[in-house]
Amino acid sequence: MCCLAYFRPEATLFCKELLQKETKMNTEPERKFGVVVVGVGRAGSVRMRDLRNPHASSAFLNLIGFVSRRELGSIDEVPQISLEDALSSQEVEVAFICSESSSHEDYIRQFLNAGKHVLVEYPMTLSWVAAKDLWELAEQKGKVLHEEHVELLMEEFAFLKKEVVGKDLLKGSLLFTAAPLEEERFGFPAFSGISRLTWLVSLFGELSLVSATLEERKEDQYMKMTVCLETENKSPLTWIEEKAPGLKRNRRLSFHFRSGSLENMPNVGINKNIFLKDQNIFVQKLLGQFSEEELAAEKKRILHCLWLAGEIQKHCCSKQ
């Protein structure tokens, strides 16, 4: 969980503070926040499982029900409720938005306007302007708006974080391959792949866009996005997203430093309970256990990544 520290410094101190916050969660809660889960696909199902199981952060949350466009009735005795009932219910104080990315903005806005705290799977929105507006709305309402980034809670990222500390980057690249996603549901590749961009920003600081291209063969469902970025020290970083039927989900990286190189990712262990770890962070925010500085740094990183994704989309679309 150290990986939430923004742009590398004071990571050890941050970890100690986070452990102190977790310790506070182990006490008996004075109250429980009523939760509704919106969307019960992979992420939503995992969220419901974690909410029902006896974990430290789950003790502060009470799963009221779930919202789905499908008529499901109930899942493991958790009742389905309508969106209207979820918005109007005094019992529901928190919404976990786990639907497809294209619907996030509308759901967040509705739940914030109804006076609910919001946890949303990344990307929060498919535009920087919308995200900035929603954050302002959350601040006006005095509610927590939390964007999940489980990729920062992975063992691979923790390994990389240790590897890059104190090193001068000369150049680097990150290639991600996978099966195709529907752009109408999950957004332009720079948004659907924003977890890779978040890795690069969290490892190397704010980035500038140099160029971006998109190669598509729609008849083959093939897509390749190539993005050239630059660190504040003018070190080049290349990010590639390649998707087609049959392509295995895989991540390849190459980072060259003055003191040596890192080629690809060693086997660093299994990622356990990363959604639960994210839930822990959200509950710590509900309990006011994050400082204003920590929250501001996280917001800055998220908005920077969304802004970059939007600029990448503009560059790619202008060349088509």
Image: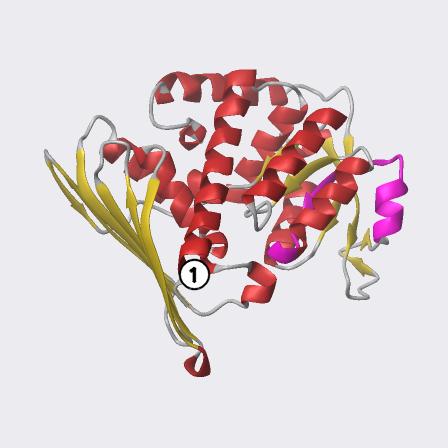
Q: Is residue 211 visible?
A: yes
Residue identifier under label 1? 318
Q: Residue at x 88, y 49 (%)?
A: 84
- Magenta segment includes 87: yes
Q: Nearer the viewer, residue 91 or 267?
A: 91
Q: Amino acid at mark 1?
A: Ser
Q: Residue at x 84, y 62 (%)?
A: 73
Question: What colour scheme does the image use?
Answer: secondary structure
- Compared with 87, 15 (above or below) is above
- Compared with 209, 243 (above or below) is below
Dot 1, crowdedness within 10 Å: few (<14), some or many (≥20)?
A: few
- Compared with 271, 203 (above or below) is above
Q: Residue at x 30, y 46 (%)?
A: 229
Q: Is residue 35 visible?
A: no
- Magenta segment includes 186: no
x and y percentages locating residue 179 in the rendered image: 44, 69
| Name of the residue lying farthest toward the front | 318
x and y percentages locating residue 97 in the rendered image: 68, 47
Q: Is residue 107 left or right of residue 246?
A: right
Is label 1 in a helix, a strand or a loop? Answer: helix
Q: Is residue 98 left or right of residue 123?
A: right
x and y percentages locating residue 312 in the rendered image: 42, 52
x and y percentages locating residue 126 in the rendered image: 57, 51
Q: Nearer the viewer, residue 134 or 245?
A: 134
Examine the image and state in which quarter residue 51 appears: top right
The range drawn in magenta is 83-102
Q: Residue at x 77, y 35 (%)?
A: 116
* Quadrant in the picture for the N terminus: top left
Q: Nearer the viewer, residue 200 or 64?
A: 200
* Quadrant in the picture for the C terminus: bottom left
Number of on-image labels: 1
